Image (cartoon, helix red, strand yellow):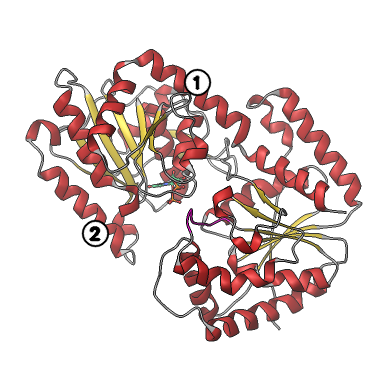
Amino acid sequence: MTKLQEVDIGTQPLERFREFIDPERLDGAIATAARLRDALKGRVVWHVNSTAVGGGVAEMLHVLLPYVRGCGIDARWLVLEGAEDFFVVTKRLHHALHGSVGDGSSLGEDARKIYERVVAENAEDLVARVRPGDVIILHDPQTAGLVPHMVDRGVITFWRCHVGADTRDEQTDLAWDLIGRYLDRAVANIFTRNQYIPDCCDHGRSVIIPPSIDPFAPKNQPLDDNVVRSILAATGIIADPPGDAEPSFRREDGSPGRVERQSVVDRHGAPPSWDNRLVVQVSRWDPLKDPVGVVRGFAEYLKSNASDVDTHLVLAGPDVKAIPDDIEQAQVYHDTSAAVKELPDGIRRRIHLACLPMEDLQENAAIVNALQTHASVVVQKSLREGFGLTVTEAMWKSRPVLASAVGGILDQIEDRVDGLLIKDATNPVEFASLLAILLQDEDRAAKMGAAARKRVSENYLGIHSLFAYAALIERFGE
Ligand code: UDP
């Protein structure tokens, strides 16, 4: 029989957030959690997804569930099992929900049969574990088919969708056609943005919970300037000498970590020094992140601001050699490098393409943290974006952010208050003139950075997600 795997969950106290958020909000969240714990009377809150490691959902569950257990609520996490044919279908579904064709395989009746067979096998084990009155939160397309099984068992069932597309098209219709039929009986469906709610879930029982970041993770923990400097020098993004501190950070499990590995930096001059200002974009080498557009926009900025002699651009992403099966990223990296080569020498010397080491993802995260912390401006010039985590990460570090007015970024940034939005993401002149505002008016940039930090501390930390889930279970969980 197919067996779901149970993932171990530690415990963490919500009190940990006290240094980061308004104390009244924290007390409110603690009170809500206590109320929920009492109302649940020992009933279990289950989460089911399709992997224990890798990917945003697994990362989020690893971060958030220990707090739920820390509140005395019996949270458990199960991972479903499936053979390769199942994951081919669900990967295809994932792409289709984004509006893209993926590997182009069918989402027709054959795919449905594979999907329903594996779901039914998992349901058998799951039904034996849960009890009527328990609460279950099923994550993403892989688990949608479990909804009717859980409802029939008397479990209070939510389905959480972490993906979506702003507009409907043939692909999204195909995907919703396959999984939409299972969702109607969930007490509520949860989406990242309003625009992502498909017609089949537009029945007044869909709610929005945006993604959150973990302020204690290597990616977002506070780093002293000296440490930032040492990390950036140790990995070769800026010139030596390093700061007075060690290039150190705190790992997820609390143990000390150290940045040792070099980034591979494609550049045509000397590394920037600590005193140079950096414009930074961190993202996968993906055409939709438009790294070539960032290069052209930055070149446009330098051309029209000849008096700026100290600002450099760093485009950072994963080391493409570490992801050999991802040919597209290698191609985009290559195209970006070629776009830099075409520029006049004085400009290209100030552009650095950094491939960050991927052997140790926490080390990689610490480098991202140092870059975002040190940046004078963080840009995210995406052509399309679900919810731009890099935007929230930079805002958390009080950075002024310049980002395209697309997708979830429209929810994340209030234009001219806590960042600047590029109306036409394909226009390098607009990019250049908005960048000039942030680089030349440092007071204004600092004010936006402070507002950005406030926005994140009020809306986008893990505790806000927990609070939103707790409120949802209280509201629907009778
Ligand atoms: N990221 C990283 N190392 C890299 C490049 C990106 O850790 O070399 C992280 C980045 O900090 C962010 C995530 O990958 O947390 C990307 O999320 P985002 O929502 O910005 O874009 P996605 O890649 O999901 O489209």
Q: Helix or strand or loop: what does disc 1 sit on?
A: helix
Q: Name the residue under label 2.
A: 331
Give the image location of residue 177, x and y in percent: 57, 72
Span shown in magenta:
162-167
Is 439 displayed left or right of 75 in the figure?
A: left
Query: Residue 163 in magenta?
Result: yes
Q: Distance between the residues labelled 2 and 1?
A: 37 Å
Q: Position of residue 359 (x, y in %)?
A: 40, 53
Numbered tag placed on residue 471 in the rendering: none
Label whose residue precedes the other's in the sequence (2 or 1): 2
Residue at disc 2, secondary structure: helix
Of 415 and 58, which appears nearest the observer? 415
Q: Where does the image place residue 285, in percent across and percent down from the top left? A: 31, 52
Q: Mark 1 points at which residue?
A: 450
Q: Which image quadrant is residue 157 in?
A: bottom right
Question: In the picture provided, is 461 more to the left or to the right than 410?
Answer: right
Q: In which quarter of the image is the C terminus?
A: bottom right
Q: Which residue type carries mark 2?
A: Gln
Residue 239 visible in image: no
Give percent across and percent down for residue 196.
55, 54
Label 2, residues with CA under 10 Å away: few <14, some 14-19, many ≥20:
some
Local crowd at mark 1 within 10 Å, few (<14), some, or many (≥20)?
A: many
The residue lying toward the viewer, choosing from 194 and 140, is 194
Residue in the image at 49% along x and 70% along y: 91
Report the residue at 58% width, 40% height from top. Answer: 214
